[in-house]
Amino acid sequence: MKREETIEFFVENARKDFSVVEKNLAQVINEIKDSEKKKLNYIEEIDVKNVLLQFEELKKSFENKDSKYYGKLFGVPITVKDAICVKGIESKAGSKILKGYKPLFDATVIERARREGAIILAKTTQDEFGFGTFATHTVKVPKNPFDIERSCGGSSGGAAGFTSFTKSYHIAIGESTGGSIACPACFCGAVGFTPTYGLVSRFGLIDYANSLDKIGAIGRSVSDASLLLEVISGLDEKDSTSLNNGFERSEVPIKRIAVVKEFFQNSDEDVKKVIQNKINELKKFYTVEEVSLPLNVEYALSAYYVIATCEASTNLAKLSGLRYGAQGEVEGKHFDEYFSEIRSNEFSEETKRRIILGTFARMSGFRDAYYLKAMKVRTKLIEEFNSAFEKYDLLIYPTMPVVAPKFSEIEKLTPMQNFAMDLCTVPSNLAGLPHISVNAGFVNNLPVGLMIVAPHLEEKRLYSLAKVIEE
Amino acid sequence: MVQVKVTIELIKKVAKNARLNLTDEELEKFVPQIKEIILDSFNKLNEFDAKGVKPSFQPVEVSNKFRGDEVKEGVTQEEALSNVVAKLKEEGYFKGPKAM
């Protein structure tokens, strides 16, 4: 990545000449209009009037040289996954049941981005509540910029799709529960940076699964994604699971790397070839060996889907057609009847399926066998990762076992086959480990992603290796 | 070890608990899918020996944090009602379905 293409370069110029901000903003808004005309479906909501108001305010910051002028994101347009609340802008997590909901407040990540001079540009499309691997479980399905017959990946599909589509300076805020940043970044040839669980505040996120959700960044370079992560990370008293740590872009020495054998072997031959080439290059600079994670390969998906559906079914219980979002006729109806009616009408099939799975696993008599057991299995899976990290600084493997599939192929997958696609992305997400997906090459012009995983709170290691790979 | 039989009746009961009305078509589709996921994926956890293992309710250690008990400004009544449709608003209150 050339320095002229980075956000850092853009911000330096924007501080010298405000027309840089104006030109870039006009261009990116035109690109959104263009993408909408072509039905590429990256954008869920844009309020141009609101964007122009922010622009006018920044103009004043430029003239007054206030703190936003010195901000790390001065003049940078940021898109936001629909599940993250933006004050006054429809935020519905890709769901019909939240249609029309305009939050009264900004999520902490939005507040922090604004403080650094960012322009909150638009909401991006996603699977409803994040339930999916291909961003197909929603009304507006984003199409892959490399081939519009293929998926952008999910669930932050619009975020990664637009990052890859735009030629303007821009970064996207995404969110990952089981791989929703890494997967779409991989399929769209972008960089997806998912932090340690708790490093970034979840305040203002429309929850999928509380013990798994992580807000992170998608950018066209390691530099851009890392810059955004630096801005949004750090303790927040509004989120009780937020950690005392933040992330700073500084490099640390990397010596030993391990390829996780099983994740590599279970990938398509073409994907393996691309990844093998990267591994061969890395061997020139680092010790690269193989490691096995048998427990994670065998049990991570099961434990993940139990935890994710249990927590999701609890979170979605609050959505009942009152106070915000979709609302119906209450006259003459008992509350049970009203709630059931609105939920049945507004939730998609995938959401209903997951609510049923989660409600089942939490039923009396089953809770200990499924939810509690999954939490114990998670402990052992984290331990397995930690013992690998005693010997290695970082672990690597393909982000996705395939290149972006065609929509016609996705339609044929059963829910079980769909879940199995998350084999490589789920383990680090379940364990709350930070990970980054960077482009490793192409198969027939379709991007292949390399996944790098670090121990808890060692984001700097990811930053260090990912920068080398990118260069 | 849990023994569970995934039947239409069970799924109907679960759906009722979850406040979902499933159509016959949805039920017909869901039962085999859910059966497959529970038997092949969820039940896989049965074979895992986790005796004496502490559960990780969060993947990283999170300690309780307390903040001062200070009065701060909240939302106004008008703001609280700003997302409510006209027919479910009355004299500054939310209107809901009957509870009895």
Image: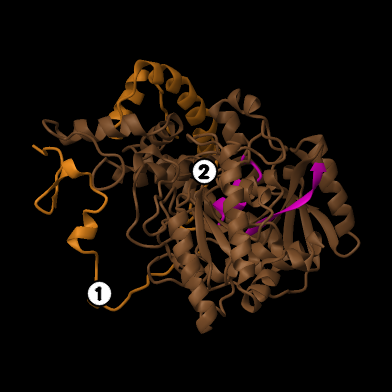
- Magenta-colored stretch includes residue A443: no
Q: Nearer the viewer, residue A103 or A339?
A: A103
Decide: few, some or many residues near mark 2? Use Cα within 10 Å; few <14, some 14-19, many ≥20: many
Q: Quadrant of the C terminus of chain B?
A: top left
Q: Does the rendering let one see residue A186?
A: yes
Q: Chain of mark 1?
A: B
Secondary structure of the residue carrying tag 1 is loop
| Display colour for chain A | brown
Residue at 57 percent across and 53 percent down: it is A29
Q: Which residue is rendered at x = 44% and y = 41% of the image?
A: A309
Q: Are marks 1 and 2 on the same chain?
A: no
Image position, residue A330 (x, y; %): 16, 35
Above-or-below relation of B45 to B50: above
Image quadrant in which you'd find residue B73: bottom left
> Residue sitting at 26 percent across and 32 percent down?
A340
Drawn side of residue A55 relative to residue B22, left or right? right
Q: Is residue B23 left or right of residue B36?
A: left
Residue at mark 2: A126
Q: Is residue A431 magenta?
A: yes
**Residue nearer the viewer, A151 or B32:** A151
Rendered location of residue A394, percent (x, y): 73, 61
Seen as rendered, the residue at the extreme bottom is A65
Residue A179 appears in the rendering: no
Residue type for callout 2: Gln
Q: Which of the chains is orange?
A: B
Q: Amino acid at mark 1?
A: Lys
The residue stretch that appears in magenta = A422-442
Q: Nearer the viewer, residue A392 or A18?
A: A18
Q: CA distance from mark 1 to mark 2?
A: 34 Å
Quadrant where the N terminus of chain B sits is: top left
Q: Position of residue A336 (x, y in %)?
A: 20, 34
Q: Which mark is residue B72?
A: 1
